[in-house]
Amino acid sequence: MDNLIILSSVTQSMKARDILKSNGITSKVHRIPAYKGKGACSYGLIINKDIEKALEILKDNEINVVGRA
Amino acid sequence: MIYLDNGATTFPKPKSVINSVNFALKNGANPGRGGHRLAVKSSEIIYNSRKTLANFFNINNPENVIFTLNCTEALNIIIKGVLKSGDHVVISSLEHNAVLRPIEKLKKRGVSCTIAEAVERDNEKTLNNFRNAINEKTRLVVCTYASNVFGIKLPVERICALCHQYGILTCVDAAQAAGVVPIDLSDSSIDYLCLAGHKSLYGPMGTGALIINTDTIPDSLIEGGTGSSSDNYNQPEILPDRFESGTQNFIGIAGLSSGIKFVNSKGVLNIYKKEMDFIKKTYFEFKKTDKIILYTEEPDINFNVPVLSFNIDGVDCETVSDILSEKFNIATRSGLHCAPLAHKSYDTIETGTVRIVPSVYTTENDINSLLYAVNKIK
């Protein structure tokens, strides 16, 4: 699945989720499996729709996206 | 018991706090560690607690709210994380041992310190004393928002604004003020705000917070597991993980969030005015008799928080507290209150004082009972 955004911590994930929600994008906080050495013990968001728009919004809000899976 | 030792911790706690603690105990998995439903639910509770604190002190980023065990830990993070050998720090003459002791330790590692005298009712003189204490090596100023012994409020915003003119970082110990005095960090020169969760924020003991209101992030005090980037041998840089190693006091934090909501429901200013009225009444009644020794000027909401220290002439303070407790069922705290500097400033280092601090739950009857009891002792 390519709709998993990896973030640096559970706090960042929840903050990102709230920002996306206020912009009309639904997401769900999810534990990330170890992925190419990144995101071992990390959290992220599952986003089923408008993922590119979500990434733009997060970038505008200075949320550091570590990767995608 | 008539409880007037709220400067040590508030008692009782609101029902909502007790309910939150019970809920967390029954439903709590370790937040920020696993991916199962219970762990995520716990993480939500912690995150919402961060947001509650962030809103209460008016900052935008909940990740800048770092949960600590108490105000002492928050102060240690800043003092030890900011100051390096060769640095100079300025503190006030009213500081608690939570500030004084870490600095005493750092003095052995090449940090120097100047104490700026806090002048009661004269903010200009106090500010001038801080100005004169600063030198070219001053890296940090640490000051209490209000004395835990004598209730004197420092002009912290002006002190911090002065520091920023010189590029000096500022740390405020708000243990005795948060929850009873409105504190708004949105337009503030306070860089680091250190809080006790268990005093006027009505959270359980074992809670505190550090709010970082600057881009200058100190070195970490404790390193360990954060539930994030576990493949990295180094402590994470990101907030709040940098300062939250090991399992957090989840149950306490859940309670603290409810405590803040409780304070919001009452209104900080309403609490402040009510408690100050009790302190003023006590002061005025005490002043009528020569046998009661008072150390400060008449309490004023512009210059004080609701804390009052006194002594009874000819009776040592610990005996007064003992009689109040055993004979009259009134709880107070006597001695030096972990604040030798404050007592030195007011010349009570040899005697100590009896301290009373009301809370939201204090009633007019409680104060009348205190007055009756003190009258009987003298």
Image (tube, helix red, strand yellow):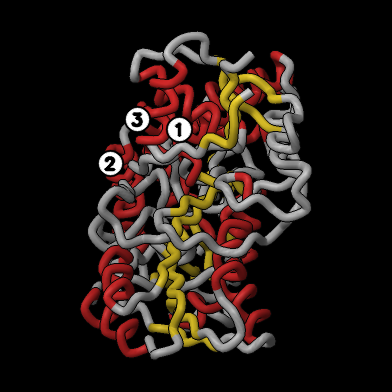
Q: Earlier in the sequence, mark 1 or mark 3?
A: 1
| Residue pointed to by mark 1 | B51
Labels 1 and 2 within one chain: yes
Amino acid type, label 2: Leu
Amino acid type, label 3: Lys
Dividing the image into 4 quarters, which one contains the N terminus of chain B? top right
Query: Tag 2: Cα neighbours inside 10 Å, few (<14), some, or many (≥20)?
Result: some
How far from the left and from the top, in percent, is residue B288?
31, 64
The numbered dot on residue B266 is 3
How far from the left and from the top, in percent, is residue B69?
65, 48
Mark 1–mark 2 distance (CA, rounded to whole Å): 21 Å
The answer for which chain carries disc 3 is B
How far from the left and from the top, in percent, is residue B194?
49, 56
Is residue B292 in view from this perspective?
no
Mark 3–mark 2 distance (CA, rounded to whole Å): 9 Å
The numbered dot on residue B207 is none
Query: Tag 3: Cα neighbours inside 10 Å, few (<14), some, or many (≥20)?
Result: few
Residue B94: name its quadrant.
bottom left
Against B249, residue B341 (above or below) is below
Residue shown at the point (52%, 47%) measured from the top left: B6
The answer for which chain carries disc 2 is B
Against B359, residue B139 (above or below) is below
The secondary structure type at the circle numbered 3 is helix
Identify the residue at the far top of this view: A48
Q: Earlier in the sequence, mark 1 or mark 2?
A: 1
Labels 3 and 2 within one chain: yes
Amino acid type, label 1: Lys
Against B218, residue B64 (above or below) is above
The numbered dot on residue B269 is 2
